[in-house]
Image: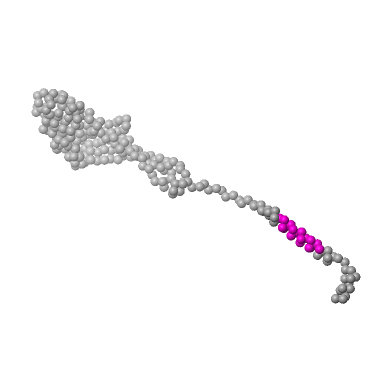
């Protein structure tokens, strides 16, 4: 998928108003001061172009006094630079339209080219690693049980300049990371117990009475048994003559 950012001429003018005056280091002890930007325009296929004032101070010029240039043309050329760490949007600076005739006699065109070489070397510092900035892994909510994160990566880009705007197009690749299996937890974080399969209840063996209870029950059984035997024996005894007389008398 592609995403595009568009900077209009008005947007670029607003940024330039905050950026200038701009001082840039040259070599070890030199510098160039760019100020009074005006007449900003967009050159298709090239970049931004504006008229500026410049002040160059550099020991290589052979003089300690800075050299002032009332009017020069500054070009800002956006380019996509491939690096081992990913594509970067770099801005290369270039001075043009300097009238050499207004410069001191000891400064020739070769010195201007040397300044431009220093400025163009700064593109490594005047760059944006957009592939790193725009890449991110988004964690997804726990409610999505099978998906853990969305990995959105910027892999490359293109820059285009028209007469009306500067456009940066970025190519993204998206991938979904599965969620790592985790045990279901309670709200407090403690793991839920694993449910166990219900088992059929085992028959319980009858409890045996204690020795004292067994003794009492045995005595009762003997007494009841003896009474029954006596009752049975009395009911079966044969009646004597004395028994008959007692029955008649009664």
Q: Residue at x 37, y 41 (%)?
A: 150
Would you say residue 162 is visible in this rendering? Answer: yes
- Indicate the position of residue 34 as horizontal and vertical percent values: 16, 33
51, 55: nearer the viewer: 55
- Indicate the position of residue 161 as horizontal and vertical percent values: 22, 36
Q: Is residue 203 above or below residue 233?
A: above
Q: Total marks drawn?
A: 0
141, 175: nearer the viewer: 141
Q: Main secondary structure of the magenta part?
A: helix
Q: Which residue extends farthest front?
A: 212
Q: Is residue 184 above or below residue 213?
A: above
Using the rendered view, name the quadrant where residue 120 is placed: top left
Which portion, as a residue range, is magenta?
214-230
47, 147: nearer the viewer: 147
Q: How is the image coloured?
A: one colour
- Indicate the position of residue 179 as horizontal and vertical percent values: 43, 42
- Indicate the position of residue 204 as horizontal and vertical percent values: 64, 52
Q: Residue at x 45, y 48 (%)?
A: 186
Q: Is residue 120 magenta?
A: no
Would you say residue 111 is visible in this rendering? Answer: no
Q: Residue at x 17, y 28 (%)?
A: 30
Is 222 left, or right, of 55 in this rendering?
A: right
Quadrant into which the N terminus falls? top left
Quadrant into which the C terminus falls? bottom right
Q: Residue at x 31, y 33 (%)?
A: 86
Q: Which residue extends farthest bottom?
A: 249
Using the rendered view, name the quadrant where residue 152 is placed: top left
Is 137 left, or right, of 239 in this rendering?
A: left
């Amino acid at each position: 998928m592609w995403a595009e950012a568009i900077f209009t001429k008005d947007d670029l003018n607003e940024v330039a108003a905050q950026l200038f005056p701009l001082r840039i280091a040259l070599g070890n002890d030199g510098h160039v001061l760019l100020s009074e930007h005006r007449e900003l325009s967009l050159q298709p296929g090239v970049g931004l172009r504006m008229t500026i004032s410049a002040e160059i101070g550099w020991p290589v010029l052979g003089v300690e006094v800075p050299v002032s240039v009332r009017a020069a043309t500054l070009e800002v050329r956006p380019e996509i630079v491939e690096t081992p760490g990913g594509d970067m949007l770099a801005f290369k600076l270039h001075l043009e339209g300097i009238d050499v005739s207004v410069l001191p006699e000891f400064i020739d065109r070769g010195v201007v080219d040397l300044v431009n070489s220093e400025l163009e070397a700064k593109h490594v510092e005047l760059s944006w690693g957009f592939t790193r900035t725009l890449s991110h892994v988004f964690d997804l909510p726990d409610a999505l049980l099978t998906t853990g994160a969305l990995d959105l990566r910027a892999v490359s880009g293109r820059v285009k300049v028209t007469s009306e705007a500067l456009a940066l197009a970025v190519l993204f690749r998206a991938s979904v990371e599965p969620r790592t299996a985790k045990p279901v937890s309670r709200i407090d974080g403690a793991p839920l117990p694993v449910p166990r399969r219900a088992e059929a209840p085992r028959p319980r063996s009858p409890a045996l009475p204690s020795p004292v209870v067994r003794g009492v029950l045995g005595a009762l059984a003997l007494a009841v048994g003896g009474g029954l035997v006596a009752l049975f024996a009395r009911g079966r005894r044969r009646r004597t003559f004395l028994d008959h007389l007692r029955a008649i008398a009664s």
